[in-house]
Amino acid sequence: MPSTAETLPILYQIDELIREHPYLHVDENETNTIRGSLEFNRSFEGISIKDKFEIEIYLPKNFPDDLPLAKEIGGRIPSDFHKNPDETFCFGAPEEVKRIFRACPTLIGFVRNLVEPYLYSFIYKEKYGKMPWGELSHGEQGILEHYKERFGVSHDIAAIGLLRILADEDDRGHYDCPCGSGKRLRDCHRELLAEVRRNQKTLDFLNEYINIVLPKLLNIRLNDNSVNKDLDKREVVRLSKILSELDKNIKNNKTKEIYFQFVHYLRKMGHTVPGEYISKTLMRNMKKSKGKH
């Protein structure tokens, strides 16, 4: 890292972390990487755990806008314990992780509030067979479970509807709230949505909605006889408008495949995608995909 005034806060944060955890050190060849033994002593509901792990922390260039990454390098934590495909720790649903980090957006806050609880929960589950603070499912289902709990709703479709508002920034208060309460949005979930929106960029909500939640929505509609015969036209327009952002913002083959599944679903149900919301690139892709569905 260059020694400029702009980077001094980062250097100070690293020094602060090493003072608290003296067995950590900055890698000589990769100055954005911190390695070593992390000792911790945490307790929950009277159960104290003291242990240490060999870890590696990677600082992204635009920290703290992007969170650091952490992984265990001593071989104690198996891959099936809440890890990402690259073996970095999966601390939980992205929106919740960012909310926790925002409360103390520093390197030492990252270790205290995310890394140490993760390591504590691993030892706790080894000893007691369960997670101390509850446990989400892996992957897509876990994120949907998070939003159901976050919004205080019990049905997938309600969480999906509220996430859609975050994805397309359309929270006009006179709309009915998607939670099914019968209230207007302004009298129901609007305030909570504003709070959730502070933790994550709109593009992140869009990415979650398309890649994770939309297939669930399509599956619900295809398997629920009460709704699979008709898709509300306003919803078609809103979904199409959201999906039209694909080639502008998200370069992701999985996302594109989900888009084509959605187009196929609309055709099957007798709907068409409103052309005013579809870019020229997607229109060309739609034509090419006609023979594939």
Image (spheres, grey):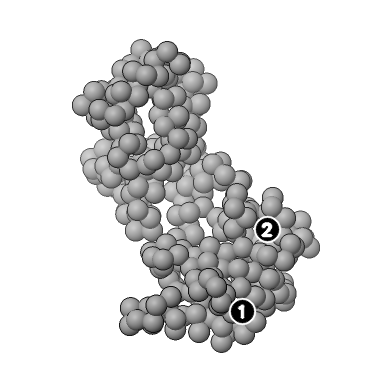
Q: Residue at x 54, y 41 (%)?
A: 140
Q: How many marks?
A: 2
* Between 131 and 15, the one nearer to me in the picture: 15
Residue 131 higher or lower than 54, as above or below: above
For residue 201, the mark is none
Q: Image check: 195 left or right of 88? A: left
> Which residue is under mark 2?
131
Please identify the quarter of the rendering in which residue 43 is found. bottom right
Q: Secondary structure at mark 1?
A: strand
Q: Amino acid at mark 1?
A: Leu
Sequence-wise, the earlier of marks 2 and 1 is 1
Q: Position of residue 151 (x, y in %)?
A: 44, 48
Q: Image check: 123 left or right of 107? A: right
Q: For the C terminus, which image quadrant?
A: top left
Q: Position of residue 223 (x, y in %)?
A: 52, 21
Q: Residue at x 41, y 43 (%)?
A: 207
User: How dense is the environment of label 1, judged by Cα within 10 Å: few (below 14), some, or many (20 and up)?
Assistant: many
Q: Residue at x 56, y 41 (%)?
A: 141
* Between 44 and 281, the one nearer to me in the picture: 281
The CA span between labels 2 and 1 is: 27 Å
User: How dense is the environment of label 2, judged by Cα within 10 Å: few (below 14), some, or many (20 and up)?
Assistant: some
Q: Position of residue 249 (x, y in %)?
A: 33, 43
* Between 97 and 157, the one nearer to me in the picture: 97
Residue 143 higher or lower than 39, as above or below: above
Q: Secondary structure at mark 2?
A: loop
For residue 24, the mark is 1
Q: Residue at x 39, y 82 (%)?
A: 3
Q: Image check: 30 left or right of 12? A: right
* Between 124 and 106, the one nearer to me in the picture: 106
